[in-house]
Image (cartoon, rainbow, N blue to C red):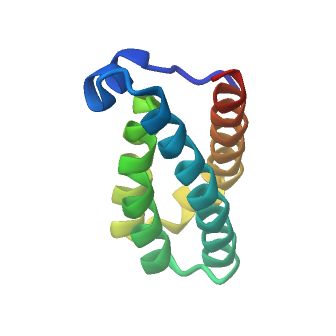
């Protein structure tokens, strides 16, 4: 899965401070591991309220690391959980996990390059 990375947003948010960007990347990676576990548990238990909450919590993190497109995607997931749309969850779960895994690998690579 190819992600769209908006480097301009990093410059805007962090004024080119690479140390701060790296700190945000590290925080993002740590939080993503925790969030993925919550999503898997929420899916297994069909806990749409928990999923709505974690999708809401995750959204700004994607934007803060330059993955604005994923931010938008997770807004849709959040709205679908608010609407209690279980069929949506079931048909999109694998894609959600793939997006999380792709975001993790992408940001991890960016961090290593810095």
Total numbered labels placed on residues in the image: 0
- The quarter of the picture where residue 112 lies is top right
Q: Nearer the viewer, residue 106 or 15?
A: 15
Q: Is residue 34 above or below residue 69?
A: below
- The quarter of the picture where residue 62 lies is top left
Which residue corresponds to the image point at 39% horizontal and 50% vertical from the top-left?
A: 59
Q: Position of residue 56 (x, y in %)?
A: 37, 61
Q: Nearer the viewer, residue 100 or 108?
A: 108
Which residue corresponds to the image point at 29% horizontal and 24% vertical from the top-left?
A: 15
Q: Position of residue 104 (x, y in %)?
A: 67, 42
Find the residue positioned furthest to the top. Answer: 8
Q: Position of residue 2 (x, y in %)?
A: 65, 21
Q: Position of residue 54 (x, y in %)?
A: 46, 67
| On-image quarter of the C terminus | top right
Which residue corresponds to the image point at 49% horizontal and 70% vertical from the top-left?
A: 51
| On-image quarter of the N terminus | top right
Which residue corresponds to the image point at 59% horizontal and 24% vertical from the top-left?
A: 3
Locate residue 18 relative to residue 76 in the image: left or right: right
Q: Nearer the viewer, residue 8 or 94?
A: 8
């Amino acid at each position: 899965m190819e992600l769209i990375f908006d480097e301009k947003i990093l410059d805007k948010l962090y004024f080119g401070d690479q140390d701060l960007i790296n700190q945000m990347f590290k925080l993002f990676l740590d939080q993503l591991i925790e969030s993925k576990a919550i999503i898997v548990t929420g899916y297994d238990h069909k806990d749409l309220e928990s999923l709505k909450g974690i999708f809401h919590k995750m959204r700004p993190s994607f934007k803060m690391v330059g993955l604005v497109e994923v931010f938008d995607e997770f807004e849709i997931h959040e709205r679908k959980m608010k609407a209690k749309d279980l069929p949506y969850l079931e048909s999109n779960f694998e894609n959600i996990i793939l997006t999380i895994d792709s975001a993790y690998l992408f940001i991890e690579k960016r961090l290593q390059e810095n």
